[in-house]
Amino acid sequence: MKVVGFAGYSGSGKTTLLERLIPDLRLRGLRVSVVKHAHHKFDIDHVGKDSWRHREAGAYEVVVASDRRMALMREFEQQHQPGVHELLAELDPRVDWVLVEGFKDCDLPKIEIWRAATPEYRERLALYPHDPHIVAVATDAPQLPAATALPVLHLGDPPAVVQWLLEQGARFDYLPQPLEACE
């Protein structure tokens, strides 16, 4: 499996870019998974549904499956922030590409999403000058805040981003980490 992270501040366009990359990769016959970092308490369940009722009753894990999909929900008995390698270990290893959204401090090769369209974003420091794991910058800005030798990809051209990913594929080959490294 190949794994690439997409890092950037909230509102930079990470989700929108991934939403546009996934269909292009799928059209090329590739199986794609996504690992997304969520902040705070989130829920994919709905009050009153069977899975919600099982979780509320105290189940540690609830797997919901049909002939079309499966979802695993796990309640941590103590507060625990799983690392990206721990989450990658949960995925089906037959996937071709995993797009990781968020986890901007992880040690995976990442593309930084840099958008200078809003004043509050321009005031933040770019990640790429200080993060050796950033391998490219995807931007809509005519000029980046700091010079770089990294490839600069156009945020508005997802097919070109996919083409670059495929051309650079070998650099994204993922070697599973021992579970101790995931903590």
Image (cartoon, rainbow, N blue to C red):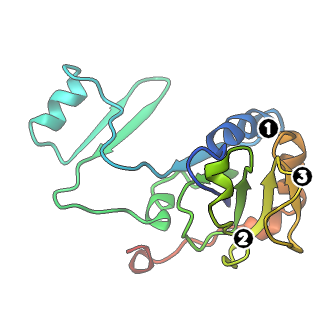
Q: Position of residue 92 (x, y in %)?
A: 54, 50
Of helix, strand and loop, which one carries label 1?
loop
- Residue at left 69%, top 66%? 126
Give the Cα distance between marks 3 and 2.
16 Å
Q: Position of residue 19 (x, y in %)?
A: 67, 35
Q: Quadrant of the C terminus?
A: bottom left
- Residue at left 36%, top 32%? 44
Three-letter code for the amino acid on which mark 1 is drawn: Gly
- Residue at left 83%, top 47%? 162
Q: Residue tagged by mark 3?
A: 142
Three-letter code for the amino acid on which mark 2 is drawn: Tyr
Tell which tag, 2 or 1, sits nearer the viewer.
2
Q: Quadrant of residue 124?
A: bottom right
Of helix, strand and loop, which one carries label 3?
loop
Q: Is residue 80 left or right of residue 176?
A: left
Q: Residue tagged by mark 1?
A: 29
Q: Is residue 27 above or below residue 85?
A: above
